[in-house]
Image (cartoon, helix red, strand yellow):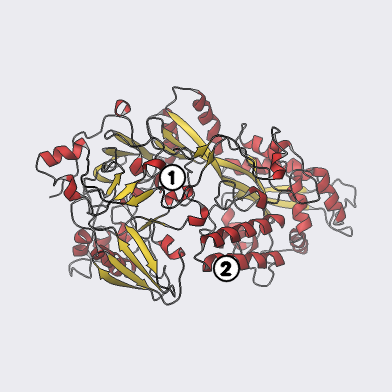
Amino acid sequence: MMGIETKFKFKSKAASLLVGVSMLAISSTASGLETLPEDKSMSGMKIELVGRDDLWTYKSCDNYNESPLTKSYVDAGKLPPVNERMPKEPWMAKTDQMVDGIGEYGGTFRHVIGGRPEGFNWLAGQSQGWGGINIQLMESLTRLGPLWQIKPEEANPLPNLAKDWEWSSDRKSLTMNLIEGARWSDGDIFDTEDIDFWWNDNVQDANVASRLPKDALGAGTTLEILGPYSFKFNFDEPKGNAVLAQLAYMGGAPGPSHVMKPLHPAHNSDATYESYANGMPASVLPIVTLGAYVPVVHKVDELMVMKRNPYYWKVDEECNQLPYYNETIYKLTSWDDRTTQALAGTGDFSNMENPGNYVEALKQNKDPNSPVKSVFGTRLIAWDLMMNLSSDFGVSSDYERELRQLFRNVEFRKAISHAMDRDTMGQSVARGPFFHPHAGGFVAGSPFHNFEDSIYYGYNASGANSILDGLGLKDSDGNGIRNLPNGGADLVIDILHSSTRSTDIKLADAAVSMFEAIGIKPVLKPSDNTDAFTDNGNWSMFIAREHWVVATKNIGDRLPTTTQNPAWHRDNGGDLLPFEETLVEKAKGILATNDLSEVASLARDIQRVRTENVYTVGLIQAPAALLINKRIKNNHPGAPVYMYEWAEDGVMRERLYTPKADQLDEFLPGVLAEYK
Ligand code: GLA
């Protein structure tokens, strides 16, 4: 049932030779193409990816079950019976993919966040405080978060409020069908009136700061309402499934038109755009949502209490209305406090993103009584050493110009990769089994990564030295530092890095002796605003966090699809390297296709070309850990902190529960949102 293999499996022949040996200790030859050693994940766990129809479906039941809390409201005559509150075919979670199975009703789920609610009018771009509140309130047409669990060839945006859709054969129109008969938390029907209002009075109205920009689906896109539950987008040009990704959280979240339309200037002559934007203030509760919980109490800088939505349109396979918890609370403190409280057991959830915290978290894992289990799943964060590949951009001397030519030489980039002792680097950041070498490009946890595609020039200082000798970079003046060819200047190279991120500082410090070992003198350049340097091109080498997870999502940041990107090759109009031209061609293929197996195959080509040519020098990659209190069930242990969306979406909170005996008392027992 769990879809998890506990055994460590090897995929490639090269990797199988490394069984039982510390992989980081393996040295690499300076010639021949080796691939990155297969990852030995910290949990030894592999996730079996599933099909896009395995997580949920849309299906009706003859009768529905509900929580004792909503039942008490029905009995008191304050709510219609549950059968009347459900849509025609509710969204139905499949039990096979719920790691602990069907849940139990009751209890509270405790979030801790650093944000604060600005207001609840998400149609006008207001934030509700992040950390999972927005995600809980802004149900969207499509959904991305759970895609981390889906096979890459099926990983198109998932249905949510839109239960299905169809492209016209010329891909110039997209017809979407909404779930039928779902209701807002006050009982009003959700239908295309809400879609019409969202699109025409918010997205298309330049006076409203909508999350979805006006032309996000292409200039000239129009909306045609076809009926109460179906509508069509008409496009000027053929489009692909990238459009559907724009309609997920946060771009595709309709708001309650029956509440907001009367407050909008187009429908109310007394209203202004400002009064409209603030039309659902954080101080006036409850609000109306399609989400699983409704905010009912907000104590400024202290707490937000959200109670279950009696009209929630999702169920499990036994026809129990979701969610299982009666309540979600959000303590309003700081992001650091989120991790502290999760480790202390006073909070239930944290995205732990900084490896400096990992040792403490792991210690706790050994204590059977610790409140939280840190699940280090796949490796999704990584650090790279980048070399500035622009021939001229930001260059201020002849020496720098010569350096850039060196950086543009793949042999030099290989030598730098061979100089990097990733094992030592990893241990300098945090002692323990947190790191794996990285070859650049897709991280090991990416569904688009295969070890056999990552060409890896691993640690081999003498190999690095012979490559540099071969490039004519000799120490011609006998001062221990190599010189540029023909008795040129000493090879002294600046290394830019962040002065505020502890991991980046430690990596740069560790790199110093590795550069010295190959006769290059590094000069560290810490900065609290590294963007300023990468924006103006005035840097040589740069150590920073750089991790690519989803091929369709961040392609423009990673490959030179525009003349301004990526950060390590800006102003690339006239000087793309031949392998970069190949990368651009592959990237264009990804953007134009609707065939995910083609995306996956192009991503594999990209990874091979990118790593073979050492586009960036991958250093180390680490898992981030999701901290979820042990009382919480149905938390898939492989859920990433971030992949297609934050974990708050990826773990599918609507399916989480705590068995009766372990449930915590509710902050507001016996209460539901009530509307006048
Ligand atoms: C903030 C947090 C993230 C995540 C998101 C969810 O950005 O820093 O870890 O919780 O909110 O929106």
Q: Residue at x 71, y 64 (%)?
A: 396
Measured as percent of width and height from the top left, residue 151 is found at 50, 51
Look at the image and tell me whether residue 218 can be seen. yes
Task: Indicate left or right for 395 with 200 as reference.
Answer: right
Give the amino acid at mark 2.
Answer: Lys
Specify the label residue 647 is tagged with: 1
Does residue 355 sit above or below 522 in this rendering?
above
Q: Under 8 Å from ligand 1: the CB of mark 1?
A: yes
Does residue 509 sit above or below 407 in this rendering?
above
Quadrant housing the N terminus: top left
Q: Quadrant of residue 162?
A: bottom left
Measured as percent of width and height from the top left, residue 144 is found at 43, 54
Q: Can you identify the residue that label 2 sits on?
A: 588
Specify the label residue 563 is tagged with: none
Where disc 1 sits, the SS reads: helix
Task: Indicate left or right for 572 with 321 as reference.
Answer: right
